[in-house]
Image (cartoon, rainbow, N blue to C red):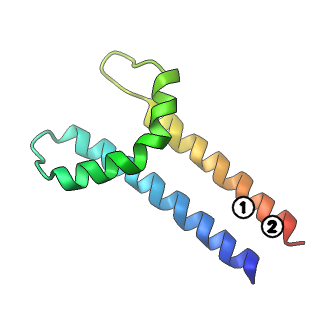
Amino acid sequence: MLSNFLNQFITVFFNLLGFAILARILLSWIPSVNNAGIKSFLFSVTEPVLGPFRSIIPRIGMVDISPIVAIIALDVVESMLLYLVSYIAL
């Protein structure tokens, strides 16, 4: 019962974080979006994840690949947490 809740919570949390990163990427491509509320919310949610990757991974020209690496790392962490929860539930 608890393991099902934890599995769902972890899955939803990481999916929402991944979607927030994707939304931030898409909004960065559209400079005419003037809704500062959405941009500041996405920045405050995703910057703790993207900041460390941005400090390690240099830009390639004008392209920042740190969000791609962050999404891959989040998928790996999610898989490890789900495995850990299933292992503990045994």
The numbered dot on residue 86 is 2
> Which residue occupies 24% across, 49% down?
39
Label 1 environment density (alpha carbons within 10 Å; few <14, some 14–19, many ≥20): some
In this rendering, the answer to whether 71 lies above or below 6 is above
The numbered dot on residue 82 is 1
Dividing the image into 4 quarters, which one contains the C terminus? bottom right
Q: How many labels does the image show?
A: 2
Residue 89 at x, y percent in the picture: 85, 72
SS of the residue under disc 2: helix
In this rendering, the answer to whether 78 lies above or below 1 is above
Q: In this view, does 75 lie to the left or right of 55?
A: right
The three-letter code of the residue at mark 2 reads Ser
Q: Residue furthest bottom?
A: 1
Residue 26, quarter of the rendered image: top left
In this rendering, the answer to whether 64 lies above or below 36 is above
> Which residue occupies 86% across, 64% down?
87
In this rendering, the answer to whether 9 lies above or below 74 is below
> Which residue occupies 54% across, 58% down?
14
Dividing the image into 4 quarters, which one contains the N terminus? bottom right
Residue 57 at x, y percent in the picture: 49, 22
* Residue at mark 1 to residue at mark 2: CA–CA distance: 6 Å
Who is closer to the viewer here, 55 or 59? 55
The three-letter code of the residue at mark 1 reads Leu
Label 2 environment density (alpha carbons within 10 Å; few <14, some 14–19, many ≥20): some
The numbered dot on residue 24 is none
Q: Residue furthest right?
A: 90
Q: Is residue 25 left or right of residue 5?
A: left
> Which residue occupies 72% across, 61% down?
82
- Residues at circles 1 and 2 in contact by the CB criterion of under 8 Å: yes
SS of the residue under disc 1: helix
